[in-house]
Image: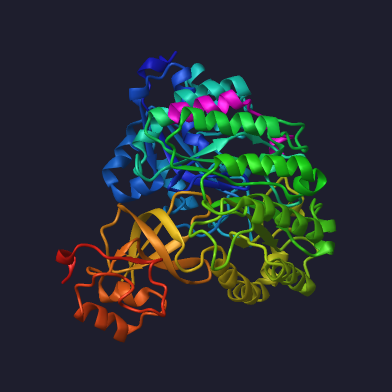
């Protein structure tokens, strides 16, 4: 019998992206943390557990020795709603196979990869279940499989799901593993689970495979936050659930009291947190129980941090597609839900909640507290040319009615075994691919860009933007949070640091900006010309005429106080 105290374990995180779970850096999902906690609970000492991300293996070949030498190698990963990523690159199937081939000890694979694997991590694709050459494939919870495998002397396990008591223990005991993440401690956001499963059965979604919602009590989540805080985490997202408003209830109806206990408890154990965001909110919950939903949304907006996003799974505004895919919300109902979230949480720090949604010249220069985001999926059963028009009309109506969306997520379906879309596959998505590309481009131009100008107008301040990479003479970074804005700042700056930024311009899904506040007597020409209203001639005059006594002496016609300040005269060139 293998003694758990003598086992060396390596966990490799290939990253996950599920309908209600995200783990691409700077996020860290629950999978590696809970798996580490299960191993400790089974008797494996913390110091014998090594954690690597797939990017860390790519960056340093010496880390592969930990894969090779481990008595037990556990890979967690899987993309069921893939997108485009900045902070990390999810493992491709060939890389995962290489991990299995390199491991000389017992190897196990788990996570959403169990739903299926395509040739690449992309939409408009079909998947098949594949063990990718590992000794064991965990077809239920990988953390439960890890616990049982260690208990059974590394000889096998029966697939099963863990219960809330196990999850509570493992979430706390596995918090230590975040310290081995390459982004720790400054740029890491912990995904938190409040529930799994969904009462609805949309044709393409893997979340119903977890069954009906099973909620963790508030104290279980709060204890996990406390443990993560003890290990240096200050940024959190309640992302692992199909519907945050249904938390603590019957699976569908809002329970504001449970939400209050959850959010206030998190704030109590982590009073100095930097980020508290969420992900999924079901629009049908908002319109079925509007008063309870409004109360729940107000509770969230009271405790969260600005820039939060409630992802709405509209999926399609076409009534035919809705019917054929068992989608649970109509375009009209989703519009009403968008309106309610705007009214209750579309205010900005320093702004008036009673006049929400706040935007325009008089609005406070911060992102709104909580806005809806819209998810649209293409390639579903019944999709037709009119489907694209229905979707564009819905989005245009939201904009024309003076409401705000934080972002619009448009993707093509992946067909997984076990979902209703398995029979249809990706054929519709492939047939409509060219039309999809044109439509997506139209949405970016006609909706995303003007909506972004409404949500984050020039002068909006984005605190703590983490600088990530250089491109075309700019430095790009993001805040930590749900669907953070990509920000381009002129010049090549030191990466890995944070800077406050004032927004100066807008792309389709990103913004440009300058450090905030920008010193008039020290700013570069590139920084000055980034500011709306300042061209090269004015910027040149500013530099030549330094030092300046005040911002106002530069131009009486342009409101520059949103961007500039005057530092000491000694700071002038």
Residue 221 highlighted magenta (yes or no): yes
Give how far across and how far down residue 546 sits, in percent.
20, 75
Quadrant, the C terminus: bottom left
Q: What secondary structure is the magenta-colored segment mainly?
A: helix
Residue range of the region highlighted in magenta in the rendering: 208-228
The answer to which image quadrant residue 64 occupies is top left
Give how far across and how far down residue 486 sits, in percent.
45, 61
Tell me if residue 97 comes above or below residue 556 in the rendering: above
> 18 or 415: which is nearer to us?
18
Q: How many marks?
A: 0
Give how far across and how far down residue 470 sits, in percent.
32, 65
Q: Residue at x 77, y 50 (%)?
A: 420
Tell me if residue 291 comes above or below residue 175 in the rendering: below
Task: Please say whether residue 104 is visible from this viewpoint.
Answer: yes
Give how far across and how far down residue 403 sits, in percent.
67, 63
Quadrant, the N terminus: top left
> 463 or 134: which is nearer to us?
463
Q: Residue at x 73, y 35 (%)?
A: 211
Task: Please say whether residue 242 is visible from this viewpoint.
Answer: no
């Amino acid at each position: 019998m293998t003694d758990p105290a003598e086992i060396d374990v390596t966990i490799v995180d290939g990253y996950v992206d599920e309908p209600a779970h995200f783990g691409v850096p700077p996020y860290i999902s629950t999978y590696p943390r809970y798996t580490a906690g299960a191993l400790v609970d089974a008797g494996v000492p913390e110091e014998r557990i090594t954690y690597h991300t797939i990017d860390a293996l790519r960056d340093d070949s010496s880390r592969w020795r930990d894969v090779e030498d481990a008595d037990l190698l556990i890979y967690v990963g899987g993309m069921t709603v893939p997108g485009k990523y900045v902070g990390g690159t999810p493992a491709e199937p060939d890389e995962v196979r290489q991990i299995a081939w390199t491991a000389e000890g017992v190897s196990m694979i788990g996570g959403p990869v169990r739903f299926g694997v395509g040739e690449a991590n992309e939409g408009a694709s079909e998947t098949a279940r594949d063990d990718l050459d590992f000794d064991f494939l965990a077809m239920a919870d990988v953390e439960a499989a890890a616990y049982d495998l260690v208990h059974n002397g590394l000889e096998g396990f029966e697939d099963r799901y863990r219960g809330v008591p196990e999850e509570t223990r493992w979430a706390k005991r596995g918090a230590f593993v975040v310290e081995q993440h390459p982004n720790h401690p400054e740029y890491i956001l912990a995904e938190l689970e409040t529930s799994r499963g969904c009462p609805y059965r949309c044709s393409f979604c893997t979340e119903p495979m977890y069954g009906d919602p099973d909620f963790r009590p508030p104290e279980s989540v709060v204890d996990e936050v406390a443990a993560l805080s003890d290990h240096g985490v200050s940024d959190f997202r309640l992302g692992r659930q199909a519907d945050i408003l249904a938390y603590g209830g019957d699976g569908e109806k809002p329970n504001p009291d449970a939400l209050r206990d959850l959010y206030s408890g998190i704030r109590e154990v982590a009073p100095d947190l930097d980020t508290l965001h969420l992900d999924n909110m079901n629009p049908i919950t908002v319109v079925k129980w509007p008063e309870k939903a409004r109360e729940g949304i107000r509770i969230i907006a009271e405790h969260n941090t600005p820039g939060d996003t409630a992802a709405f799974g509209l999926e399609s505004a076409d009534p035919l597609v809705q019917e054929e895919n068992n989608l649970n919300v109509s375009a009209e109902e989703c519009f009403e839900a968008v309106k309610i979230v705007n009214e209750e949480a579309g205010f900005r720090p320093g702004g008036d909640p009673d006049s929400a949604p706040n935007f325009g010249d008089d609005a406070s220069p911060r992102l709104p507290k909580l806005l809806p985001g819209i998810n649209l999926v293409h390639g579903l059963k019944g999709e037709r040319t009119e489907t694209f028009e229905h979707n564009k009309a819905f989005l245009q109506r939201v904009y024309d009615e003076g409401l705000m969306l934080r972002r619009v997520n448009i993707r093509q379906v992946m067909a997984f075994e076990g979902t209703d879309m398995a029979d249809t596959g990706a054929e519709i998505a492939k047939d409509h691919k060219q039309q999809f590309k044109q439509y997506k481009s139209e949405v970016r131009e006609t909706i995303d860009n003007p909506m972004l100008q409404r949500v984050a107008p020039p002068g909006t301040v984005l605190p703590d933007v983490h600088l990530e990479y250089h491109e075309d003479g700019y430095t790009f970074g993001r805040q930590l949070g749900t669907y953070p804005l990509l920000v381009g700042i002129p010049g090549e700056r030191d990466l890995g640091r944070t800077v406050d930024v004032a927004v100066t311009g807008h792309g389709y899904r990103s913004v440009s900006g300058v450090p905030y506040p920008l010193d008039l007597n020290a700013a570069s020409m590139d920084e000055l010309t980034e500011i709306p209203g300042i061209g090269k001639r004015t910027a040149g005059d500013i530099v030549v005429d330094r030092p300046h006594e005040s911002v106002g002496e530069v131009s009486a016609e342009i409101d520059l106080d949103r961007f500039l300040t005057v530092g000491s005269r000694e700071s002038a060139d």
